[in-house]
């Protein structure tokens, strides 16, 4: 029994470490609009890739996204020069974002690679493993 104890403990630690690495995978990817007229809008993802950051010299009036079923999942009035959009509420798949600046509507794509519920389940399993070890 003693020689299998190390194997079991190493397996548990290895699986826990693997789950943590999977949790660090990209949550979303951004396909930027490189059009010359779209240079007024800086659109990027934050470091954890779960929030869309929008910056502009002109006022951002409106932000909405259309999913693959042609439904609006995000439909907000920004009214500022800087706006953050959390991607956790979006379903998995391709989303076309439309940002309304003064005379322009700038369009770009965000692909959500993971479902938010999958991330919550993975975090719950990791916590459960840590509690069992104590």
Image (cartoon, rainbow, N blue to C red):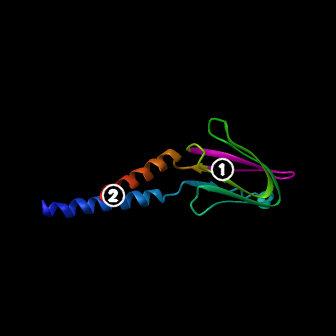
Residue at the spot x=74%, y=45% of the render? 76
Q: CB atoms at circles 2 and 1 under 8 Å apart?
A: no
Residue at the spot x=39%, y=57% of the render? 19
Label 1 crowd (10 A; few <14 / some 14-19 / many >=20): some
Give the extent of the magenta segment: 93-110
Tell whether position 99 is magenta: yes
Horizontal and vertical percent position of residue 27: 54, 54
Closer to the camera, 1 or 40? 1
Horizontal and vertical percent position of residue 14: 32, 61
Horizontal and vertical percent position of residue 12: 29, 58
Q: Residue furthest front?
A: 134
Residue at the spot x=37%, y=59% of the render? 18
Tell whether position 36 is magenta: no
Label 2, on which residue?
15
Q: Is residue 2 above or below residue 67?
A: below
SS class, disc 1: strand
2 or 1: mark nearer the eye: 2
Give the mark, 2 or 1, whose residue is nearer the N terminus: 2
Label 1, on which residue?
109
Quick check: can you spot residue 68? yes
Left or right, 2 with respect to 95, comes to left
């Amino acid at each position: 029994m003693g020689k299998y104890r190390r194997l079991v403990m190493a397996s548990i630690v290895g699986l826990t470490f693997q789950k943590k690495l999977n949790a660090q995978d990209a949550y979303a990817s951004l396909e930027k609009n490189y059009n010359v007229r779209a240079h007024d809008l800086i659109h990027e993802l934050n470091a954890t890739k779960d929030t869309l950051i929008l910056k502009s010299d002109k006022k951002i009036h409106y932000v909405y996204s259309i999913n693959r079923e042609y439904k609006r999942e995000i439909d907000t009035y920004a009214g500022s020069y800087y706006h953050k959009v959390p991607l956790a509420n979006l379903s998995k798949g391709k989303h076309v974002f439309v940002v309304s600046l003064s005379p322009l509507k700038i369009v770009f794509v965000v692909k959500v690679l993971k479902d938010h519920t999958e991330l919550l389940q993975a975090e719950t399993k990791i916590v459960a493993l840590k509690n069992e070890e104590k």
